[in-house]
Image (cartoon, helix red, strand yellow):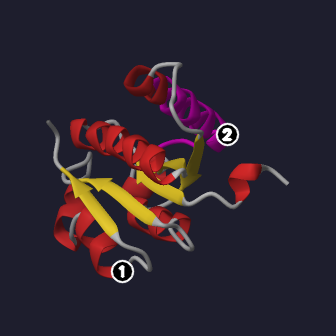
Amino acid sequence: MDANDSAPRVVVGVDGSPSSHAALRWAVRHAKLIGGVVDAVGAWEPPSHFGWSAPVVDMSYDKDLAERRFTDELQAVLGADRPVEVRQTMVMGDPSDVLLDAAQGAELLVVGSHGHTGFTRALLGSVSTRCAQHATCPVVIVRAQ
């Protein structure tokens, strides 16, 4: 069993937006203070989710591309010298649902105040609002610097 399996988990949503980058940095600083680990979580949705009428898309390619971009983003924001363990997970699905699931049993959920969202989500409410309303753990909403 890894020693970090019992460490407090700080879950953070990362979507490429400036506020999610600020949330990621905040989550790492907080995890260092409490002796925790960071679970950086990204969500991806295939083009068909948005109602595109396109030929069949190879879903593994989209996921591979999303995971590569996610890894590159974490590297760009945090660099290689990380003061705490940062585990990364990319999940297909609605970002709110993905984050709420990931935050089950976590010490804290950290999200940016404004992420990359589409018109549909603007009508349904922001990811940060849904997380604040429905998470089973405390939620911190971070604004971009």
Whether residue 80 is situated above or below residue 33 in the rendered picture: above
* Residue bearing the label numbered 1: 134
Seen in the picture, residue 28 relative to 8 is either above or below; the reply is above
Name the residue located 35 percent from the left edge and 56 percent from the top edge: 110
- Which one is in front, 125 or 6? 6
Stretch in magenta:
54-72
Q: Which image quadrant for residue 131?
A: bottom left
Indicate which label's residue lies in the foreground, 1 or 2: 1
Q: Is residue 57 visible?
A: no
Say what amino acid the circle numbered 1 marks: His
Q: Is residue 62 left or right of residue 47?
A: right
In the picture, measured across the screen, residue 68 lies left or right of residue 110, that is right
Which residue does the image show at 32% across and 44% down from the upper left?
26
Which is more toward the observer, 68 or 59?
Answer: 68
Q: Residue 89: x and y, percent?
A: 59, 47
Residue furthest to the right in view is 1
- Mark 1 or 2, nearer chain start: 2
Circle 1 SS class? helix
Is 5 part of what is drawn in magenta?
Answer: no
Residue 71 located within the stretch drawn in magenta: yes
Q: Position of residue 22 (x, y in %)?
A: 27, 39
Q: Which residue is mark 2?
A: 60
Image point 75% across, 51% down: which residue?
A: 3
Which secondary structure, mark 2? helix
Kindly identify the amino acid type of the residue bearing the numbered disc 2. Answer: Ser
Tag 1–tag 2 contact (CB < 8 Å): no
Quarter the N terminus occupies: bottom right
Q: Mark yes or no: residue 97 visible.
A: yes
